[in-house]
Image (spheres, rainbow, N blue to C red):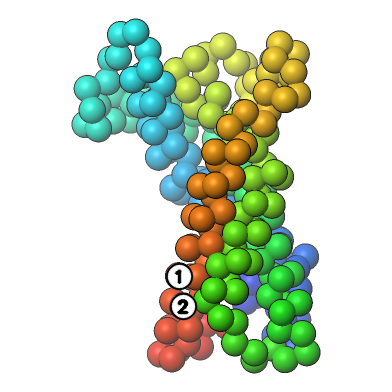
């Protein structure tokens, strides 16, 4: 999705600036949230919360049917929060990644980037996304948990967290998430770049 959007947003010289990278990343994140992330995250969060409860009701992965049988409302619980979280997530990552790539290449758009350099840039992009959207991730998790019924909407959830737990509650789990996401994004961008290079040998993707 990012490749599709970015290819339609490049300037006359075929260059993608960081602002356009942000918009293409935002579009990719929204698509990702709707098609993949929201239903899978709903299942994951419900499983985790259920296993931590005194009387778990789900009996393993095959209990996913019980969640899916709740219909679109059950499967897409917390969609607004997920779209906000995933959209901003990818927007921040691709904005930082595009800016770093353009800085590294300078006036030579054909300059190749070493995979290790890509990994460092990816880790920095991942760190930026963690600090930029952890509050949205906290809200998303609350909206997809077993106690989601306590909240009238995504914005009501954010209001209640602020009112009863304070602003620091929005950054719970930041340090553990930072380590995981930096490594995750670094690996993803290395693989992503290498796949694009391989595909370019078959047909031009950019």
Q: Is residue 103 left or right of residue 138?
A: right
Asked if marks 1 and 2 touch (Cβ < 8 Å), the reply is: yes
Percent x, y of residue 106: 77, 85
Rendered view: 128 above or below 113: above
Q: Can residue 66 be seen here?
A: yes
At 74% from the left and 18% from the top, the residue drawn is: 166
Residue drawn 59% across the image and 45% down it? 178
Q: Position of residue 131 (x, y in %)?
A: 69, 44
Taking the view exactly as shown, the residue that stands out farthest to the top is: 54
State the residue position of label 1. Answer: 191
Indicate whether 23 appears above or below 113.
above
Q: Nearer the viewer, residue 64 or 168?
A: 168
At a point 71% along the width and 62% down the height, the residue shown is 95
Q: Position of residue 35 (x, y in %)?
A: 46, 48
Q: Secondary structure at mark 1?
A: helix
The numbered dot on residue 176 is: none
Secondary element type, mark 2: helix
Q: Residues within 10 Å of mark 1 (few under 14, many from 20)?
A: some
Q: How many marks?
A: 2
Query: What's the mark number on residue 194?
Result: 2
| Residue 150 falls left or right of residue 21 | left
Q: Please state the horizontal and vertical placement of residue 206, each as a whole percent of the image.
A: 58, 83
> Can see residue 12?
no
**Nearest to the observer: residue 44 or residue 12:** 44
Q: Residue at x 71, y 79 (%)?
A: 104
Packing grade of label 2 (10 A; few <14, some 14-19, many >=20) is few
Quote the CA–CA distance across marks 1 and 2: 5 Å
User: Which one is in front, 47 or 177?
Assistant: 177
């Amino acid at each position: 999705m990012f490749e599709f959007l970015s290819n339609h947003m490049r300037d006359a010289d075929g260059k993608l600036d960081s602002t356009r990278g942000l918009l293409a990343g935002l579009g990719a994140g929204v698509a990702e949230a709707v098609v993949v992330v929201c239903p899978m995250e709903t299942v994951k969060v419900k499983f985790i919360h259920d296993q931590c409860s005194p009387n778990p009701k789900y009996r393993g992965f095959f209990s996913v049917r019980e969640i899916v049988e709740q219909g679109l409302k059950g499967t897409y619980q917390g969609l607004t929060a997920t779209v906000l979280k995933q959209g901003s997530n990818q927007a921040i990552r691709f904005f930082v990644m595009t800016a770093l790539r353009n800085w590294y290449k300078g006036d030579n758009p054909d300059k190749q980037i070493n995979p290790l350099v890509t990994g460092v840039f990816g880790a920095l992009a991942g760190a930026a996304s963690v600090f930029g959207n952890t509050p949205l991730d906290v809200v998303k998790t609350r909206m997809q948990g077993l106690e989601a019924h306590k909240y009238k909407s995504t914005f009501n959830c954010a209001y209640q967290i602020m009112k009863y737990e304070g602003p620091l509650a929005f950054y719970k789990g930041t340090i553990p998430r930072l380590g995981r996401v930096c490594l995750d994004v670094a690996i993803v961008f290395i693989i992503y770049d290498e796949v694009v290079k391989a595909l370019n040998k078959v047909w031009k993707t950019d």
